[in-house]
Image (cartoon, rainbow, N blue to C red):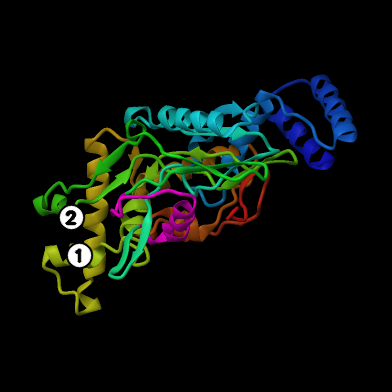
Amino acid sequence: MLNEAKNFIQMYYDETGQSEQEMETRLIEVEQQILKQGTYEQTLDELSYGAKMAWRNSNKCIGRLFWQSLNVLDKRDLHTEESIFESLLEHIDFATNNGRIRPTITVFSSQDVRIWNHQLIRYAGYETENGIIGDPDSVVFTKVCQNLGWNGNNGPFDVLPLVIQIKDNPPKLFEIPKASILEVPIRHPEFSWFKDLELKWYAVPMISNMKLEVGGISYIAAPFNGWYMGTEIGARNLADDNRYNMLPTIAEYMGLNTKSNASLWKDRALVELNAAVLYSYKEDGVSIVDHHTAAQQFKRFETNELQAGRDVTGNWSWLIPPLAPATTHIFHKPYANDKKTPNYFYQREPY
C-alpha cells in the first residue's frame, strides 16, 4: 500500500501542478498513517482526481475524452443501509438530470459497504416454462432478490431493487421510486410498426459492481456512470441472442428473408434497431452518442494523451464498436492492454 500510495500522490501532485514541498509534506503524512494504522485517508481532492484518473485508465471505455468532467460524490462517512440507499437515489437523480446526463461516481467507505447490483438500474429476468421473460443476463440476480423477499411483476422490463450490505450483516432490499427511473420508449423514425414491439431502455448505465482502486485503497462500493453509446443498447442489450434477441422479430416485421444468412437480414435489422435507439433517445432529450462520433472523440482523447506525454492503453476488442467497426480508426490500430492504476476492476459477486 505504501508504494502504491506514494506513486499515486506523486502523480497527483505532478499532474495538478502543486509544489514539491507540498508533495513531500503529504508523503510524510501518508507514510505515518499507513505505518500506524495500516491504511490512510485520502483527501477529497485526491479521491476526486484519482476517480477521474481511473476513468482515463479504463482500457475498455471508448468515452475517456471526458474523464475530467466526472462528478465525484464523497459518501465515505455513511455506514447504514438506509443512508446509503438515499445517497444512491441522489446519484441516480443527479446523474439523470432530466436526460442531460452527468458523468458521476459515488464513493462509499472502503471498509464495510457493498452494493450487490450489477447496475443501479437494470431489468429483471424470469425463468418460465415458455422461456425467459425480461433480461436473461439478470436471471441469477433476480433469483437472489426473490430469495430475499422481492416479488416482481414477471414483465419484460421490471426494474430490480437495490441490494445493500454492511459488513457481514444480512443484505437489505430497497425499491427504487418510479419517479427516479427515466426510461426511453424505443420507436423508429420511419417504421411506424416499431412502437408495437413495446421496447424501452433506461436512460443511464450506472455500473455498481466494480471496485475503484486509488493509491492502494480499494473502494468496493463506488457506482459510476457516463452516458450510453447507442450500440450498447441497439447492438448488444436488445440484439444479442443471449439477451433480448430482437433481431429475428424486427427482421420479420421488415419482411426480410431470415432463411439465408446471405440476405444479411441480421445486419439490416441491426442497423434499423440502432437507428431506432438513437432516434428515440435524441427525441426524448436523453444524452447518447453514436459509435462513429464516439470513435472520433476517442481519437481526440488519444491526441490529448500523447500531448500530455502519456501512452494510450486500450482493450481493442472492447473499444471497437459492435456495429461497423472497420469504419472507425480504432479497428485499424493496435493498443497495448496494459493495466494502469488508478482504475476500476471487476470483483467477485457477493452472492
Residue 65 on image: x %, y % = 49, 38
Label at residue 249: 1
The amino acid type of the residue labelled 1 equals Thr
87 to the left or right of 278: right
Q: Quadrant of the C terminus?
A: bottom right
Q: Is residue 126 above or below residue 47?
A: below
Q: Which residues are magenta?
A: 135-157
**Is tag 1's residue or tag 2's residue first in the polypeptide sequence?**
2
In space, the residues marked 1 and 2 are separated at their CA atoms by 9 Å
Residue at 81% x, 42% y: name it.
Answer: 1
The answer to whether residue 4 is magenta is: no
**Looking at this view, is 340 or 233 the one in front?**
233
The image quadrant that residue 100 belongs to is top left
Is residue 103 shown left or right of residue 191? right
Q: Is residue 146 left or right of residue 220?
A: left
Element type where label 1 sits in the image: helix
Q: Residue at x 53, y 34 (%)?
A: 105
**Label 2: how many Cα within 10 Å (few below 14, some 14–19, many 20+):** some
Kindly indicate the quadrant of the structure image that contains residue 80: top right
Residue at the spot 59% in from the left edge and 48% down from the top edge: 312
Q: Please identify the quarter of the rendering in which residue 343 is found.
A: top right
| Residue carrying label 2 | 197
